[in-house]
Image (spheres, rainbow, N blue to C red):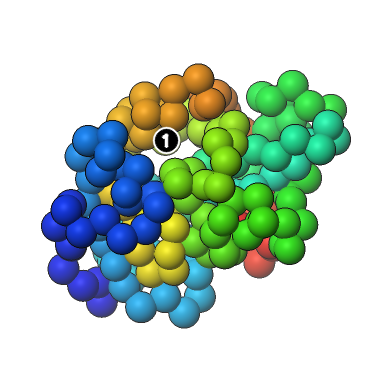
C-alpha cells in the first residue's frame, strides 16, 4: 500500500525540486514499485487509473523528441499525436534513448526536471480531471497536482491535443503490453 505523503519541503527528485521552486502545490504518493506501470500506481495507491498520467518519450521523423502525457487507462494514437506536433510520423523513442534524453529510467519518466526542456503534448482530457498523478522521476514516486497547474508551469513547451484512445481501438496505438517510457 502507499506510504504517507511526504511534506513538500522534502523535494528529493529533480521533478519535485522543480515543482517546489515554482511554488506549485503538490503532494507526493510513494509505494514499492515492481511493475512500473500506470495500473500498478493506481492499484498500490488507490488513485483512479484515468488520473494516473503516463509520460512517454516519442520521436518524430525530424528526429525531434516529444513527451506525450496520456491518461493511464488510455493509449496513444501515434497518427493523432503526429498531427498534433506537425510531424509526418512519430514513433516511440528507442528504449536506450529514454535515459539519455530525459535523465529518467523507463517507468519513472516525468514531464518535469528533464535534462533539457522537451516539448510536451498533453492529452486534452487530462485538463478535465480535478487532479493528476505524474511520475516524480523515480520508480514508486508520484507527484499529485492539478492538471492546469502543470500545463501553466510548462508554458509554451506544452501543446494540448486529443490523441488518446481506448485500448480496444488499436489503430497505431501504444497500449497494454507494448513499450512504455
Q: Can see residue 48?
A: no
Residue 163 relative to residue 157: left or right: right
* Number of residue marks: 1
Q: Can see residue 110?
A: yes
Location of residue 72 in the rendering, given as x and y in whole percent from the top left corner:
47, 52
Residue nearer the viewer, 49 or 118 = 118
Residue nearer the viewer, 137 or 181 = 137
Identify the residue at horizontal 55%, vertical 47% (top origin): 115
Say which quadrant the C terminus sits in.
bottom right
Residue nearer the viewer, 166 or 141 = 141
Residue 77, relative to residue 11: is it above or below? above
- Residue position marked by numbered label 1 in the rendering: 126
Residue 132, relative to residue 163: is it above or below? below
Say which quadrant the N terminus sits in.
bottom left
Residue 25, relative to residue 127: is it above or below? below
Identify the residue at horizontal 26%, vertical 61% (top origin): 29
Residue 148, quarter of the rendered image: top left
Location of residue 128 in the rendering, given as x and y in whole percent from the top left corner:
35, 30
Residue 170, relative to residue 29: is it above or below? above
Q: Residues within 10 Å of mark 1 (few under 14, many from 20)?
A: many
Residue 32, quarter of the rendered image: bottom left
Location of residue 127 in the rendering, given as x and y in whole percent from the top left corner:
38, 30
Residue 79 relative to residue 34: left or right: right
Identify the residue at horizontal 59%, vertical 51% (top origin): 102
Location of residue 180 in the rendering, given as x and y in whole percent from the top left corner:
63, 59
Residue nearer the viewer, 20 or 163 = 20
Amino acid at each position: 500500500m502507499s506510504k504517507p505523503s511526504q511534506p513538500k519541503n522534502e523535494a528529493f527528485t529533480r521533478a519535485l525540486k522543480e515543482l517546489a521552486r515554482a511554488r506549485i502545490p503538490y503532494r507526493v504518493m510513494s509505494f514499492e514499485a515492481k511493475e512500473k506501470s500506470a495500473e500498478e500506481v493506481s492499484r498500490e495507491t488507490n488513485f483512479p487509473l484515468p488520473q494516473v498520467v503516463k509520460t512517454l518519450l516519442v520521436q518524430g521523423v525530424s528526429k525531434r523528441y516529444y513527451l506525450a502525457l496520456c491518461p493511464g487507462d488510455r493509449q496513444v494514437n501515434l497518427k493523432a499525436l503526429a498531427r498534433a506536433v506537425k510531424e509526418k510520423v512519430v514513433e516511440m523513442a528507442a528504449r536506450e534513448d529514454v535515459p539519455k534524453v530525459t535523465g529518467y529510467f523507463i517507468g519513472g519518466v516525468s514531464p518535469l526536471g528533464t535534462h533539457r526542456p522537451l516539448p510536451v503534448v498533453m492529452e486534452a482530457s487530462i485538463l478535465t480531471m480535478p487532479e493528476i498523478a505524474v511520475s516524480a522521476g523515480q520508480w514508486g514516486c508520484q507527484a499529485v497536482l492539478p492538471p492546469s497547474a502543470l500545463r501553466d508551469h510548462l508554458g509554451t513547451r506544452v501543446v494540448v491535443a486529443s490523441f488518446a484512445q481506448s485500448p480496444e481501438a488499436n489503430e497505431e496505438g501504444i497500449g497494454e503490453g507494448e513499450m512504455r517510457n
